[in-house]
Image (cartoon, rainbow, N blue to C red):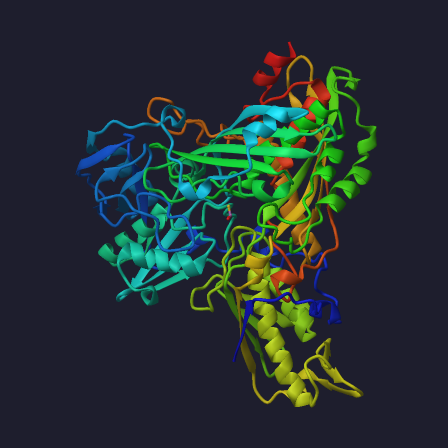
């Protein structure tokens, strides 16, 4: 039986709070953790089907043109140069993004051929020696040198911003640059494809299996029913595995041709070229306010880039329309078409760079006005979404700012350059955290077996976020079972299609589908107990109603099976849904070397119900860490001549490591959001990133009086200004 819910009205019942098992929300460890550290969790590249052969992708050595001829090599099983090969990472939830024509090269490093051999070494050797002949076309590779497109839907203007700036008591008007970012998941992309007749089974690192299945079918020209995807363990995605990547389709084409299973795994360097990047951005922010620091004007212009014809463009200004009040507002969004690698979603697309830059602008304005930056934010929190006047589904920015200031010791903050410890200037910074909330259609099947144990099945993925564990917790709470008695199976498209992992929507979307299936099973048990579902108490394998108590297993004469199916409805239109928080950083800046050390960092977040305090905290710790990366270290550099990626390994592209990451604290504000459905949980995964870097940059200014608007704030830039 399917329990279907379209979230059209708020659900104030707090049903999960009525449950008595006491497992939901608890900071329990991830079940698959021991498997991962012991090497027993099998990632995509680790399966060894009989007859496996190895493919290595060959990459284009020109930025734009055509492949005229593919040379021959010996000692290999096949050299594949097929028009179905995916030339770009397919991004998004629909079908595939546009694929280039048969032999078109759109950027340097693009996958253009696959060499397959009996061993990886033979394939790699042949791939390195494969000669390609091209015709070369002129290619723009520098976004700053290209006239941007201005997609109509992404521009908006209310009131008269220019006038507001002219009449303002205080204003700021500055330009920031953020570089391209690489997702850099620990597990590089890999796929093993194997055909059985006309059906293909692919093990691959993927975030969203149900849409990936459609994308694979589309790319290969077969029906979705002929595709089975398996991704039981995924070593991080950060956006790079939202769609289907070149290796997956190449492996499938080769496996069909050879009649053998084919493995194609990317090297770390290929990962930089072939997975999509976050676009670099240029952002101009104009803020105007009155003498009290009340905003009168907000202007946010964002310029990003992508390949010609790509639909995605980094939604830099996504949170700008509703974060702060101001009568006069203008948003500009420009996209430069360049021959750099495909741009797509990477770790909180939009807010990661948009909120980060905006929140440093707010810091600049606070200084111009001469008020505390916390106070400036508090004075400009809107009652409802500006312009549309839609109410917020829940909104705890003010609480997050106040609680954070208290916990962080904000009152001890001094003026710039006033705190010098040895050769280190020390300062504190604050920023708001904000990220849009989304619910995505999702299904799950829950089976309560005759022995009283439960199985949860869905094609949802666990990309290291804790999905196995939280879905178990939801089912165990609803069904009154111990965690050991709930078994969760994920990552197989033979199971009901889920939201997948992305955009912070995974936990709440797939969690709601599990909740609904369990609610249905509770109803079935209630019928057997002769009570209503609301009157039923399930705990430790016992069912109770009134003064009757029975072991659940004794009530069953066979398994109870239910499918939960949730889809977004009216509430996402009638309310503005977002998650909120505050970021805090204390940094030390070396006055001679310009080195920045983050000394401590803290985040206070409100995201509705928290399913597991530990996995939720881990997401936020990761977010704060990315904030350090965005502020201080991460930059994908493109060669200005041909657009090739210069910093294409983890030595050159610096993700903060242990030595860069200080003591961090994460606090959650208790919240229930009725508008997002019966679990009252909003998305959390990316909130910790959105603005975290601004707290670091603002702390740098507070420490040494230097504003770096060209990210990341590396020592060379700081030295230049400190002198
Ligand atoms: Mo995310 S960048 O939507 O995986």
| Position above or below: 104 against 537 | above
- Tell whether 134 sits left or right of 379: left
| Position above or below: 537 against 127 | below
314, 32: nearer the viewer: 314
Q: Position of residue 405 (x, y in %)?
A: 79, 37
Q: Position of residue 461 (x, y in %)?
A: 51, 58
Tag count in the figure?
0
114, 572: nearer the viewer: 572
Residue at the image position 62 percent from the left and 87 percent from the top? 556
Q: Residue furthest top?
A: 723
Q: Position of residue 683 (x, y in %)?
A: 60, 53
Tell me which corner region of the image, top left, top right, bottom left or bottom right, holds residue 120: top left
412, 493: nearer the viewer: 412
- Tell whether 682 sits left or right of 219: right
Where, quadrant-wise, is the C terminus in this rendering? top right
Q: Position of residue 481 (x, y in %)?
A: 68, 73
**Does residue 661 show up?**
no
**Does residue 73 show up?**
yes
Residue at the image position 45 percent from the left and 64 percent from the top? 492
437, 647: nearer the viewer: 437
- Tell whether 698 sits left or right of 557: right
């Amino acid at each position: 039986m399917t329990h279907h819910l379209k979230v059209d009205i708020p659900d104030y019942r707090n049903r999960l709070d009525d449950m008595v098992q006491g497992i939901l929300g608890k900071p329990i460890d991830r079940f698959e953790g021991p498997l991962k550290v012991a090497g027993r969790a099998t990632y995509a590249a680790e399966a060894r089907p009989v007859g496996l052969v190895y493919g290595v992708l060959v990459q284009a050595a020109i930025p734009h043109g055509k492949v005229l001829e593919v040379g021959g090599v010996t000692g290999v099983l096949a050299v594949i140069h097929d028009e179905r090969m995916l030339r770009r990472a397919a991004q998004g939830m629909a079908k595939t993004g546009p694929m280039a024509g048969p032999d078109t090269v759109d950027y340097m490093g693009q996958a253009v051929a696959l060499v397959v051999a009996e061993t990886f070494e033979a394939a790699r050797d042949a791939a390195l020696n494969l000669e390609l002949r091209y015709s070369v076309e002129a290619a723009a590779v520098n976004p700053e040198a290209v006239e941007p497109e201005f997609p109509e839907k992404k521009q908006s203007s209310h009131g008269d911003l220019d006038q507001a700036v002219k009449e303002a008591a205080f204003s700021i008007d500055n330009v920031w640059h953020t570089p391209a970012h690489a997702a850099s998941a620990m597990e590089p992309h890999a796929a093993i494809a194997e055909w059985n007749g006309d059906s293909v089974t692919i093990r691959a690192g993927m975030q969203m299996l149900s849409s990936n299945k459609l994308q694979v079918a589309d790319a290969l020209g077969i029906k979705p029913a002929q595709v089975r995807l398996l991704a039981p363990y995924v070593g991080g995605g950060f956006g790079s595995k939202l769609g289907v990547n070149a290796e997956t389709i190449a492996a499938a084409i080769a496996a069909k041709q050879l009649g053998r299973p084919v493995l194609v795994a990317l090297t770390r360097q290929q990962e930089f070229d072939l997975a999509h990047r976050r676009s670099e951005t240029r952002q101009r922010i104009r803020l105007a306010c009155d003498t009290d620091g009340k905003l009168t004007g907000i202007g946010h212009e964002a310029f990003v880039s992508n390949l010609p014809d790509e639909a995605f463009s980094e939604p830099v200004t996504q949170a700008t329309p509703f974060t702060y009040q101001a009568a006069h507002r203008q948003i500009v969004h420009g996209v430069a078409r360049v021959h750099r690698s495909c741009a797509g979603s990477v770790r909180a697309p939009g807010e990661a760079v948009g909120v980060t830059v905006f929140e440093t602008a707010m810091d600049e304005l606070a200084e111009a006005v001469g008020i505390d930056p916390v106070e400036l934010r508090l004075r400009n929190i809107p009652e409802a979404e500006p312009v549309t006047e839609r109410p917020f589904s829940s909104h705890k920015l003010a609480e997050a700012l106040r609680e954070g200031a208290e916990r962080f010791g904000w009152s001890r903050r001094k003026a710039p350059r006033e705190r010098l410890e040895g050769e280190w200037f020390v300062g504190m910074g604050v920023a708001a955290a904000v990220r849009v909330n989304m619910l995505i259609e999702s299904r799950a099947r829950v089976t309560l077996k005759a022995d009283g144990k439960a199985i949860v099945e869905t094609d949802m993925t666990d990309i290291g976020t804790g999905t196995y564990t939280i879905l178990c917790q939801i089912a165990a709470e609803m069904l009154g079972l111990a965690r050991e008695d709930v078994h969760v199976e994920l990552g197989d498209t033979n199971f009901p299609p889920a939201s997948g992992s992305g955009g912070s929507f995974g936990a709440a979307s797939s969690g709601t589908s599990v909740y609904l299936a369990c609610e249905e099973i509770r109803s079935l048990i209630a019928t057997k107990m002769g009570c209503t579902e609301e009157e039923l108490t399930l705990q430790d394998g016992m069912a109770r109603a009134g003064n009757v108590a029975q072991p659940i297993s004794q009530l069953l004469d066979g398994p109870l099976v239910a499918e939960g199916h949730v889809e977004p409805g009216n509430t996402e239109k009638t309310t503005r849904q977002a998650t909120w928080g505050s970021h805090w950083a204390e940094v030390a800046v070396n006055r001679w070397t310009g080195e920045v050390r983050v000394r401590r960092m803290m985040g206070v977040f409100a995201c509705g119900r928290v399913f597991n305090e530990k996995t939720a905290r881990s997401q936020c710790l990761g977010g704060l860490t990315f904030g350090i990366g965005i502020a201080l270290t991460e930059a994908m550099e493109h060669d200005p001549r041909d657009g090739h990626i210069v910093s294409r390994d983890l030595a050159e592209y610096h993700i903060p490591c242990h030595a860069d990451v200080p003591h961090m604290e994460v606090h959650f504000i208790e919240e229930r959001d009725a508008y997002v459905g019966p679990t009252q949980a909003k998305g959390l995964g990316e909130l910790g990133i959105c603005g975290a870097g601004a707290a670091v940059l603002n702390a740098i200014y507070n420490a040494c009086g230097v504003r770096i608007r060209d990210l990341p704030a590396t020592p060379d830039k700081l030295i230049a200004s400190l002198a």
